[in-house]
Image (cartoon, helix red, strand yellow):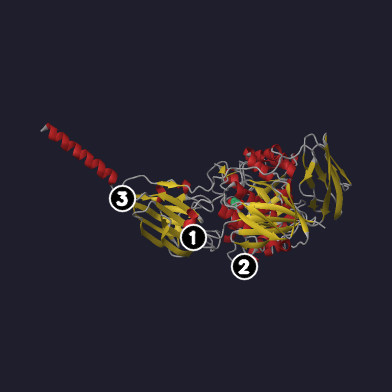
Amino acid sequence: MVKNMKILFFVILLYSFCSFTLKAQTIRLDKLDLTNMECGWGTAQANKSVEGNTLSIAGQKFEHGVGTHAISTFLLNINDNGKRFLATVGVDDEATNKGSVEFFVLGDRKVLWQSGIMKKGTASKIVDVDISNIKKLGLLVTDAGDGIDYDHADWCDAKIEMTKDVSLSSQLIKRTTQKAYISTPKTSDHPQINGANIFGVSPGHLFLYTIAATGKRPIIFSAKSLPEGLTLDPKTGIITGKIDKEGLYKTILFAKNNLGKAEREFRISVGSTISLTPPLGWNSWNCWAGAVDASKVEAAADAMVKTGLINHGWTFINIDDCWSIKPGSKDSLIAGDARDKNGMINTNNKFPDMKALSNYIHNKGLKLGIYSSPGPTTCAGYTASYQHEDQDALRYAEWEIDYLKYDWCSYGSIDTNQNLEAYQKPYKVMRASLDKVNRDIVYSLCQYGMGNVWEWGAEIGGNSWRTTGDISDSWSSVSQNGFNQAGHEKYASPGHWNDPDMLVVGLVGWGPSLHPSKLTPDEQYSHISLWCLLSSPLLIGCDLSRLDNFTLNLLSNDEVLAVDQDPLGKQASRILDADGKQIWIKDLEDGSKAVGLFNTDNNKKTPSDYFSPGNSNIKELIIFKASDIRISGKFRVRDLWRQKNLGIYSNEFSIKVPYHGVKLLKITPIK
Ligand code: GAL
């Protein structure tokens, strides 16, 4: 009897155990660890849109789900334990009218469901698919073939019905396994003068230029024929002063140490155009975003000097959003009176003394940039310039600011018209205010390309204009922002630059926590090469105080930077875009050409391709003829990353280019 009781007891125990583990269960997508969900911009959010708002599709709000951004992939190990996948999908209402995406559900690489192209305002679609007998469930959002701008995509009320109570793991598609490799030889101990060899200043305005030179310290700097009104500090190489008379002044700069002497011609153009070469510097947004404060900005300036980046021409230290008061905030660090009794803008408590910070930066030979919006508040909701433009320009001059990024943000609520006049107006207003102050301030328009800003940015007095939405550290984002510049070259010229957004190399993360750029090393070489070919402003977006050797090497190749800083100011044009290969060519002042050969791999793509890791071993042979790059006869080829001559060629040249990688060449015709 007792024995039978025992058996019965075990049978009951076993039954309840099995029924517990085998019990069907439903797992909400937002409950899973989303770290492995890839996004083309930002990071996937549980129960929020990618920008952190309530999930919302065509006016319909959702409490649960996952907000992501195309191109987005998520691979789940279902292991034959799945029953159904259910969701309601669509473009989030926070996207502008541009967003268009396509959702796919894949089972073991086969498309089980696809939404068709969905845009902002398209009614949500219901997904209800059978996922039994599949091992891997793939959730994909593509850019619908028109680029990823504003592709905010929501998987709302998304859930996976399982046959058993098992945990569900996701899998990162391993794309970033390539080891960092350094291409550029160390700079020599012999002195060498780097950076721009032309510099523009307005008559009578303060001149500040630091001679960028590598080589063993101490270096003694000197100059021949320095125009009257300027003085050069021989120990630091900082040139300051004022020149009253317009004109082009030719000077020779010298840098000498105990190993030798370097000299280089330097032209000073005194006139109405500044920023004669694209600005080189750092900006706080891609690393710190809202976590920026004065000490982080000082640390960036310190690092610019300590790492030696300043010796390669890097100059600007730019504070992005979040330095002013945030109206309505309860946080004492950012709360307070937005303006003083005279209407002059106040900083928040994270920037207790902007003038002191400015002095700190200028004393190092660097320059300070700031950020505002023509609307009442910035994109992050901090006080901006609307109806205070003159006062803000005055304030910037008082703080000795050298660069202003002026970001559209809340201005859309002031003027809802979507025409050229409305797009231009606020930028003209601030231009007029900047013109009233006695200081050169580089004027950077940021409005993401609205109204084809490249066609009129120069005309309304911008020194640069953002042509795209915000960049992110993904290949889809970088390649879209960069390669989409084809055709914009005719609008760039000295003082007027297309800006495909800041650099995403090194430790980035939009603060406070940072991660190493998700771009592979080859993708980073492509990123920097393309931005230099595009004569783009180069604003480093990472934490400079924790710069690794690879990133430092990437940012300190003088021959590569010289492509960006070439005084001719010609942006590269694209001469080939086929089969995942692109060739870009940029005319240089000395008669040579910078040529970028890219293996973009952007052309293929069936839905299942998005789940394949890129194969960095696959190299593509890229060939060009002399006539393709508008030269004839023999030509010398130099690999700029390796700073190595590859030889003399005639007729044509071919080379293998790694997956998502680049060969950046200088081609010099031989007479
Ligand atoms: C965006 C801008 C970014 C950054 C951000 C700050 O509109 O494109 O580069 O400045 O605002 O809120």
Label of residue 419 in the image: 2
- 1 or 3: tag closer to the N-terminus: 3
Out of 294 and 532, give the one closest to the viewer: 532
The amino acid beneath tag 2 is Asn
Q: Is residue 211 visible?
A: no
Q: Which quadrant holds residue 388?
A: bottom right
Q: Relative to residue 192, is residue 1 drawn left or right?
A: left
Q: Nearer the viewer, mark 2 or mark 3?
A: 3
Label of residue 606 in the image: 1
Please provide percent x and percent y for residue 624.
Answer: 69, 60
Q: Residues within 10 Å of mark 1 (few under 14, many from 20)?
A: few
Q: Mark 2–mark 3 contact, CB under 8 Å?
A: no
The amino acid beneath tag 3 is Thr
Q: Which quadrant holds residue 256?
A: top right
Out of 40 and 459, give the one closest to the viewer: 40
Q: Which residue is mark 3?
A: 163
Please provide percent x and percent y for residue 356.
Answer: 70, 39
Out of 162 and 583, give the one closest to the viewer: 583
Out of 175 and 30, give the one closest to the viewer: 175
